[in-house]
Image (spheres, rainbow, N blue to C red):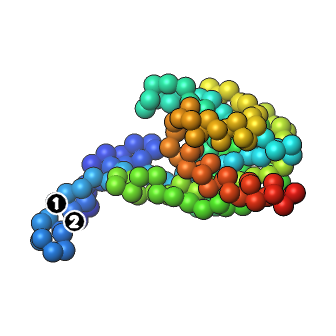
Amino acid sequence: MKRRLLHTRIFDVDGIRYAHPRRKIDREFFVIDAPDWGIVLPVTADGKLVMVRQFRFGSAALSWELPGGIIEAGEEPIKAVQRELREETGYVGRDARSLGWVHPNPAIFSNRCHIIVVEGVSLQRETAWDADEEIEVAVRPIDTVLAEARSGRLTHALMINALFLFEPWWRAKAGAGV
């Protein structure tokens, strides 16, 4: 049985009863029902990543991240991250492909986070931030970003996960001389 406990503009909280299959214990668990998210790894023609720095309310701190955001209902993940990239940074790219998806935290979240790489990005548009966004955009060397993720300087878990999926793809591409 499921009951809606809280509805917000970005997620809902549901109480869901589950029974343990062997112990026959019946208990309510809490699930954050959120839309899928997308993260984009925007790679410039000269092999750098476009990143954003923005204030995060949960940590009450500024955070260096890859662009991304909510995938709207009915929106394809690749289209969503291309939209987020354009809105947050003004960058647009030509080739996009999925590196996969992850469950952000399957203990409490119902959604997936899609990780997409977009190649050949260049600055082409004005940004279109949401009302509560104030973003600094920077183009950074990939090896520097990967080193910061390994050193603990980058702390956003989904960004580190995206970089973990990206690195072997990037190394194979660089090794192929493409």
- Horizontally, residue 120 falls left or right of residue 80, namely right
Along the line of sight, the residue nearer the viewer: 127 or 160? 160
Q: Is residue 108 above or below residue 76?
A: above
Look at the picture and state if 39 lies above or below 143.
below
Percent coordinates x, y for residue 27 in the rendering:
16, 60
Which amino acid type is marked by label 2? Tyr
Q: Mark 1 = which residue?
A: 27
Image quadrant holding the N terminus, namely bottom left
- For the residues labelled 2 and 1, the Cα–Cα distance comes to 6 Å
Quadrant location of residue 84? Answer: top right
Q: Which mark is residue 18?
A: 2
The residue under the point 73% across, 41% down is 142
Q: Residue at x 76, y 37 (%)?
A: 141
Q: Work out which quarter of the rendered image holds the C terminus and state it.
A: bottom right
Query: What residue type is disc 1 on?
Result: Arg
Could you tell me which residue is drawn at 64 percent across and 38 percent down? 147
Q: Is residue 88 visible?
A: no
Q: Quadrant of residue 74?
A: bottom right
